[in-house]
Structure formats: structure tokens, C-alpha cells
């Protein structure tokens, strides 16, 4: 070849290489643009999600305190931003270093831990959980069907709700997880597998089993096996956040607010059953955890099959084929099925949802209690709105009857809190499934079932409640009238003739009002998260009053009928009044017994 030919070949090669490089660059740009133009199940594009969220925040800024949100997929963060104030009074804005409380989203740490130990062959999800517990640990079981880890994951182990000693004020002596579980063990009021009744205690029990199996504290286990592998350096889990001093100090900069943006003073509490709701972190760490859950190749598990098992259904809505739970992760039907967990504490709300097939997810954190605008409604920007026709072959019929949440108390002094019913409130735009099997009619929502209340039980409970109200009104009016009569007699210098039954009826009325005061005091202390040892005496006193009132009823009945055998005449009005006193006293005693207002 001569020099000219060699030169031509060089030109051809240079042109060829330039073309290749140009094609590679074009393909890269095209791929990037394609990623940016990908569409969420909601129909929104990746590129517009930020503007949609920002416009939504602007729309609700009057009631917004502070909020942080991240939208992500397998390639990384699609959108992330912070809004509002961590402390409105001191104008401290939410930023990348602001920490929020996860609330019940902390439960995801429990289920990931359990699945890690299951992967290692150390936990059997289908055996009796007492296998992993000390002797004599679960003492309130009322059914022979064993409680399994799957039951704890599905929240269908049958436990009633626990209200006492869940939130502890700063300065309170912190119990160990075992002590907290033993002190607040709930009654088992449903057979395992029968109904879904959300249970913080059941999740904390699973966390304790992680402790027993792993040989380390639950917070220590999570740091070693979840936080450290994911570089979650700004996360704390222990009851008083002592496991991360930086988070503990940052938490002091966070104030909490109502859904209307009003300050909630002193909103930091220890959570005694801490695996169920104590985790506190920055948005970045919350997002890292969400990305790890959504990733089939996550470092959290040794094998991808474990990840697949995690997202396999373990429970369904009613008797339908629609999954409701996947090994502790709730399935929420939007336009697609999103999987994850929400959370609430005394002053914060959060949500973490992922769509595992596409690997997309959203995490939201706010410093507002029971917040829904961002933690629920905004999720539709990514996952789309629930449409009835996407899940049901034919329109759902509104179920008839009265229903009660399974997440309540049916035994013990808090039984009166189950005096709440719903009927005809099953909105078409919400997801619910009606089912009737094994003699139980129920409406299944995410997190909880509503059980149909027999008409007789409904009439009995409502009747007892209103009769007791009538008894209290009768007692109050009785004392007012007696007091006015005495005052008038004194002013007119007349001698008051009070028979024995008159003094007895007055004493019955006084007892009724004392009971009202005691119940009001107990309700106030419970709503302010006072320790149970500070109000359990009230139920002891109420029980004592009930016993005394039984004696007074017997005495009153005897004296009442004795009046008819005496020559002294008594007015019909007085006889009716005394009869009503006996009747309302009986009503009070029956209420004390039925609502278990005693210890």
C-alpha cells in the first residue's frame, strides 16, 4: 500500500470510530431521556412528579407543619425534597438533617429481621411461637390453636388491643422488652387465623423472639444486620434513642403538631414495646431502607429467593383472592398493589410503600400526628387511585348490619372502649371486602377487620350505656332536688323529716356520681399516657363500689317492700322514686360487671 491508501484507511477508521462514539452517546442520552419519561402506574411521568408534589404542598401549606418525601426506583432517587418547619415557633426548617419518628413503619425492621433468621434456618414461621419463649410466658391464651410467627406477621393471632403503658414520658423508668411484654400481655379474644386485628404487642413479641434466637438485644441486632449494611448512620431504635447520640440530639429540634398545624407540647415519648414503633431517622436513611426492600438483590438477604418469599402473600382480604399481607408487609390496593407500612406516634406520621414488580417506591415523613394528606393521599401520585372495577368483577353490594372493629378490647377494664359501631359507611371509593365464613361476617380493610355485631348484643350494649347515662342524670337531679328542699326548709325554719330510705337513696346517688368522677379521671389519665400503676387503683375502687352497691340494693329492696306493711302512709311519688333508685343502682352494677370495670 502506498502512503495515500494508508491515509485513506486512517480517515475511514477515524470516521468509523467517531460514528461508534456518536451512537454510544446518542444511545446513552436516549436511555436517560427514556428513564425521565417513564410513567408511574398513576399516569404521571417521572419528570413531572416533583412539580405535582410541590403544587400539592402549596395547596395544603396552611395546615402543613413539616414534611419530607422521596420517590425512588431501582436506579436511584427520582425526586426528593423537604417542606415546612421542624419547629414553627423557632422557624427551624425541615432539612436533610431533620429526624422524624417512623411510628409503626418500624415494624418493617422486625419482619426483615425475622426473614433473615428464617433464611438461616433459625426460625420456623409455622411452628408455635412458644417454642422460642421462656416457660410460662404467654398466660392469656384462650384457644388450643397455636400462635405462629405467620399469625404475628398477619396480625391474626387473636390478641385484643393494648392501651396501657405503650407511651412512656421522659424520666420514666424504662422496662426491658421482656418486662414490657409480660406487664401488658393482652387477652386472646379470637382464635388464631380467624380475624385481622392489628397488634403492637404481637409485633413486639416477634421482636423479642428475634432477641431470643439471635442472642442479642433487638436494637443491637437491627444495627448489626440492617442499619450497618445499608449505611443508615442517622437512625436510632432503642427506647430512649441512646443507640445513636446524633439522632437523640437532633430529635430535640423537632416539634410536633396536629393535622391542623397546632402545636402538640411535650410530644416525645418512649415506646415501651419499641420494636413496634420507636425508630427515628432522617429521610435519607428511610429511603435507603425502602430501596433495599424494593431491590431483589438486596444486601439484607443472602439469596434472592428470600426476597421473593418476603413478598409472597400470607393473608388475603376476607375470603377473596386479593392479598392483604406479605410476611408483615401490608398490601394496599391503589391502581396497583403497593406493599409496605404506615406509622403514627404521639406527634409524627410516616409511610413507606413499594411496588416490587417495578421496583418503585415512596417514603413520606411528617411531624404531624395522624397525618393523611401526605402519608396517604399523596401516594396516589405514584401508585394511582383505587378503582373498584380493577379488583372486582361486579360492583360490591353494601353489607347490612352493625359492625365493630376487631382491634378493640373485649375483656378487662377497657372493654367500654369497644362501644363504637359503624353501619353503612363502606364507601365505594375505598377498598374493602365483605365475607361470611365459619359463622363470622366481616368487612376487611387494610390493617383490620370489622366484625358484624349480633342485633341482641348491640341492643344490650347500647341499652346498658344509655340506661347508665340515665342513672347518672337521675342521681344528679335527685341530689339537686334534695339539696334545694333542705335549703328551703332551713330558710323557712321548717324541720325536715327524712326517712331511712331517703338517706339511703341519697347515698346511692352520691355513689353514682363518685363513679362518674372516677371514670372521668381514669379516661383523662389514659388519654395523657399516664402509667397504668397510677390509675389501676381506680378500677379497684370501682369494683369495691360495685360490691357495696349490691348490698345497698338488697337493703333498699327489703326496706322498700317493708313500707307497704306499715301503717304509715307514703306517697306514690316517693314509692316510684325509691323504685327508680333501686332500678338505676341495679343498672350501674350490671354495667360495672358487663364492662369489666374492676380488677
Image: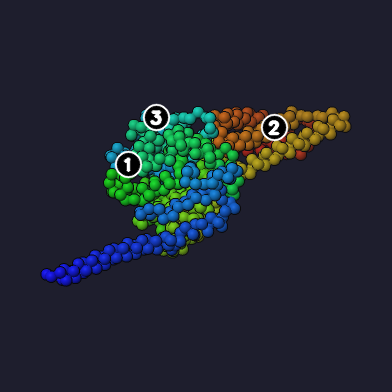
Is residue 412 in view from this perspective? Answer: no
The residue tagged 1 is: 116
Q: Earlier in the sequence, mark 3 or mark 1?
A: 1
Give the Cα distance between marks 3 and 2. Answer: 44 Å
Instruction: State the residue at coordinates (56%, 48%).
Output: 65
Q: Nearer the viewer, mark 1 or mark 2?
A: 1
Instruction: State the residue at coordinates (16%, 71%).
Output: 4
* The N terminus: image quadrant: bottom left
Instruction: State the residue at coordinates (26%, 67%).
Output: 19
Q: Label 1 crowding class (10 Å Cα cut-off): few <14, some 14-19, many 20+?
A: many
Give the Cα distance between marks 1 and 2. Answer: 60 Å
User: In which quarter of the view is residue 557 placed?
Assistant: top right
Is residue 94 in view from this perspective? Answer: yes
526, 231: nearer the viewer: 231
* The C terminus: image quadrant: top right
Q: Is residue 562 left or right of residue 353?
A: right
Q: Are marks 1 and 2 in contact (CB under 8 Å)?
A: no
The residue tagged 3 is: 136
Q: Earlier in the sequence, mark 1 or mark 2?
A: 1
State the mark number for residue 31. Answer: none
The residue tagged 2 is: 510
Q: Residue 183: image x %, image y %?
A: 47, 31
Q: Is residue 128 left or right of residue 490?
A: left
507, 434: nearer the viewer: 434
Amino acid at each position: 500500500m502506498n502512503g495515500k491508501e494508508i491515509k485513506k484507511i486512517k480517515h475511514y477508521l477515524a470516521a468509523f470510530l467517531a460514528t461508534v462514539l456518536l451512537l454510544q452517546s446518542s444511545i446513552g442520552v436516549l436511555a436517560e431521556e427514556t428513564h425521565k419519561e417513564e410513567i408511574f402506574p398513576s399516569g404521571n411521568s417521572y419528570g413531572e412528579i416533583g412539580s405535582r408534589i410541590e403544587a400539592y404542598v402549596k395547596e395544603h401549606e396552611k395546615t402543613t407543619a413539616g414534611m419530607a418525601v422521596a420517590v425512588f426506583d431501582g436506579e436511584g432517587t427520582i425526586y426528593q425534597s423537604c417542606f415546612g418547619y421542624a419547629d414553627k415557633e423557632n422557624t427551624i426548617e425541615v432539612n436533610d438533617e431533620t429526624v422524624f419518628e417512623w411510628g409503626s413503619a418500624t415494624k418493617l425492621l422486625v419482619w426483615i429481621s425475622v426473614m433473615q433468621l428464617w433464611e438461616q434456618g433459625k426460625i420456623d414461621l409455622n411452628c408455635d411461637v412458644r417454642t422460642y419463649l421462656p416457660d410460662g410466658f404467654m398466660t392469656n391464651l384462650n384457644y388450643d390453636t397455636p400462635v405462629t410467627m405467620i399469625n404475628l406477621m398477619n396480625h391474626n393471632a387473636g390478641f385484643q388491643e393494648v392501651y396501657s403503658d405503650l407511651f412512656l414520658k421522659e424520666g420514666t423508668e424504662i422496662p426491658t422488652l421482656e418486662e414490657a411484654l409480660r406487664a401488658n400481655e393482652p387477652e386472646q379474644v379470637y382464635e388464631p387465623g380467624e380475624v385481622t386485628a392489628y397488634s403492637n404487642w404481637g409485633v413486639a413479641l416477634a421482636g423479642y423472639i428475634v432477641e431470643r434466637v439471635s442472642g442479642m438485644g433487638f436494637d443491637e441486632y437491627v444495627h448489626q444486620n440492617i442499619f450497618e449494611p445499608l449505611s443508615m448512620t442517622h437512625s436510632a431504635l432503642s427506647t430512649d434513642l441512646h443507640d445513636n447520640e446524633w439522632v437523640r440530639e437532633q430529635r430535640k429540634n423537632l416539634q410536633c403538631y396536629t393535622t391542623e398545624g397546632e402545636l402538640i407540647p411535650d410530644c416525645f415519648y418512649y415506646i415501651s414495646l419499641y420494636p413496634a414503633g420507636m425508630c427515628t431517622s432522617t429521610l435519607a436513611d428511610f429511603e435507603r431502607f425502602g430501596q433495599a426492600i424494593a431491590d431483589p438483590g438486596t444486601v439484607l438477604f443472602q439469596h434472592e429467593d428470600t426476597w421473593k418469599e418476603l413478598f409472597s402473600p400470607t393473608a388475603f382480604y376476607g375470603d377473596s383472592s386479593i392479598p392483604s399481607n406479605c410476611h408483615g408487609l401490608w398490601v394496599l390496593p391503589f391502581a396497583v398493589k403497593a406493599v409496605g407500612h404506615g406509622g403514627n406516634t404521639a406527634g409524627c406520621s410516616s409511610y413507606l410503600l413499594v411496588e416490587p414488580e417495578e421496583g418503585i417506591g415512596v417514603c413520606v415523613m411528617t411531624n404531624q400526628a395522624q397525618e393523611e394528606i401526605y402519608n396517604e393521599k399523596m401516594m396516589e401520585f405514584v401508585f394511582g387511585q383505587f378503582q373498584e372495577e380493577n379488583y372486582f368483577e361486579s360492583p360490591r353490594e353494601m353489607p347490612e348490619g352493625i359492625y365493630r372493629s376487631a382491634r378493640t378490647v373485649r375483656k378487662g377494664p377497657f372493654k367500654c372502649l369497644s362501644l363504637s359501631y359503624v353501619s353503612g359507611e363502606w364507601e365505594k371509593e375505598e377498598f374493602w371486602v365483605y365475607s361470611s365464613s365459619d359463622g363470622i361476617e366481616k368487612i376487611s380493610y387494610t390493617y383490620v377487620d370489622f366484625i358484624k355485631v349480633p342485633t341482641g348484643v348491640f341492643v344490650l350494649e347500647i341499652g346498658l350505656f344509655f340506661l347508665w347515662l340515665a342513672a347518672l342524670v337521675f342521681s344528679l337531679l335527685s341530689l339537686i332536688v334534695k339539696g334545694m328542699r333542705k335549703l328551703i326548709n332551713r330558710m323557712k325554719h321548717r324541720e325536715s323529716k327524712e326517712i331511712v330510705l331517703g338517706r339511703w337513696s341519697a347515698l346511692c346517688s352520691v355513689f353514682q356520681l363518685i363513679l362518674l368522677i372516677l371514670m372521668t379521671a381514669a379516661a383523662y389519665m389514659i388519654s395523657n399516657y399516664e402509667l397504668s400503676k397510677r390509675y389501676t387503683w381506680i378500677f379497684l375502687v370501682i369494683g369495691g363500689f360495685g360490691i357495696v352497691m349490691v348490698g345497698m340494693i338488697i337493703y333498699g329492696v327489703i326496706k322498700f317492700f317493708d313500707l307497704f306493711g306499715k301503717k304509715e302512709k307514703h306517697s306514690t311519688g316517693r314509692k316510684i322514686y325509691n323504685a327508680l333508685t333501686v332500678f338505676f343502682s341495679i343498672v350501674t352494677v350490671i354495667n360495672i360487671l358487663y364492662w369489666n370495670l374492676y380488677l
